[in-house]
Amino acid sequence: MRRRRKQPDRVSHERWLVSYADFITLLFAFFVVLYASSQVDKRKVGQLALAIQVAFQKLGIFDASNTKPETTITEPMPFSHVQMVENAERYQSLDRLVNSPHGDLTKAPVRKDMDMIEKKLQDALAAEIKKHTLSVTPTREGIVVSLHELGFFDSGSTTLRPGTEQTLSDFVRVVAPFRVRVRIEGHTDNVPIHTARFDSNWELSTARATEMIKLFISKYHVPPELLSASGYGEYYPVASNDTAEGRGLNRRVDLVILNSAADSSSPLPERQVGTQPDTATHAPD
């Protein structure tokens, strides 16, 4: 049989076209992405900018202003988006009202006033601070005057001990001229309580806060609109509940003088375990 001669392989001089086609395809895709990125949805950007501005104003980081981001649109907006923008604008208007210099009762003190209040409280309550029956602590939300149970309440009771009303009188005398908002918080340790009057630590902490509210209004004539009460039970400790001393620190009523960046509904995480001074000491119940 005659053997077939093997043909030599031919080298193609056009293989570069494959790489060139891949390069052109990638380049086309790159410019498509650039073009798509340049077509920004101004409506969505305006909504995002407005939400960020409102959030920072509520935190007190930026001052409220009369300017707001561009949210004008040329196409119909879904109702849910319309409602979101309206809510953001409403909150922004509310912030301007609260921070308005024309509001008497809602005007929040500036940091300079808070520093002055802290200094006056330190002087007025120096004797109690020295005895470790209370502490005055500046925080991001304002000033916390912590009334320790050992110096102000009997265990499981909402009745103030004799002689403690003078301390409250000194407190009111300092803060009243500034017309600041005060949130009164009741706190306990983690030892369960069950008495004829209180079934839980929630009830005890709330009752102590509301009793303090009543005293401030009835005896010291503090305007009720400047006061709020909260009961947190054992869930915002400032010390460990593993020792008698720590439990004593956690049984307290905090008078929180709120500054312009404060939220009157809940305490900040920074006031949990380890944020209170270690100078206060308590004996166990």
Image (tube, grey):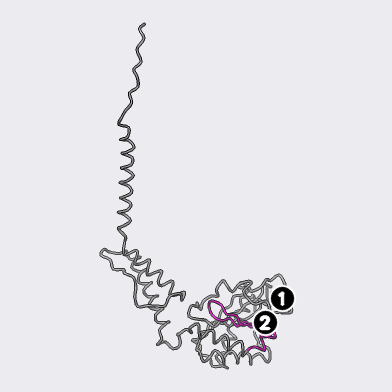
Residue drawn at 45 percent across, 74 percent down: 61
Residue drawn at 34 percent across, 67 percent down: 46
Above or below 252: residue 40: above
Mark closest to the chain's N terminus, 2 or 1: 2
Q: Is residue 149 left or right of residue 32?
A: right
Residue drawn at 35 percent across, 15 percent down: 6
Q: Position of residue 109 (x, y in %)?
A: 48, 84
Residue 268 on the magenta segment: no
Q: Label 2 crowding class (10 Å Cα cut-off): few <14, some 14-19, many 20+?
A: many
Q: Position of residue 38 (x, y in %)?
A: 31, 57
Q: Position of residue 148 (x, y in %)?
A: 66, 82
Q: Label 1 crowding class (10 Å Cα cut-off): few <14, some 14-19, many 20+?
A: some
From which residue to which does the magenta span run? 125-154
Q: Which residue is mark 1?
A: 245
Q: Amino acid at mark 2?
A: Glu
Residue lying farthest top? Answer: 1
> Regarding mark 2 in the picture, which secondary structure is present there?
helix
Q: Is residue 224 left or right of residue 250?
A: left
> Which image quadrant for residue 162?
bottom right
User: For residue 149, which numbered disc appears in the image?
Assistant: 2
- CB under 8 Å between callouts 2 and 1? no
> Regarding mark 1 in the picture, which secondary structure is present there?
helix
Quadrant, the C terminus: bottom right
Label 2, label 1: how far apart the Cα atoms are: 12 Å
Q: Position of residue 196 (x, y in %)?
A: 67, 80
Residue 129 on the magenta segment: yes
> Which image quadrant for residue 235?
bottom right
Residue drawn at 74 percent across, 79 percent down: 283
Q: Is residue 171 left or right of residue 149?
A: left
Q: Amino acid at mark 1?
A: Glu
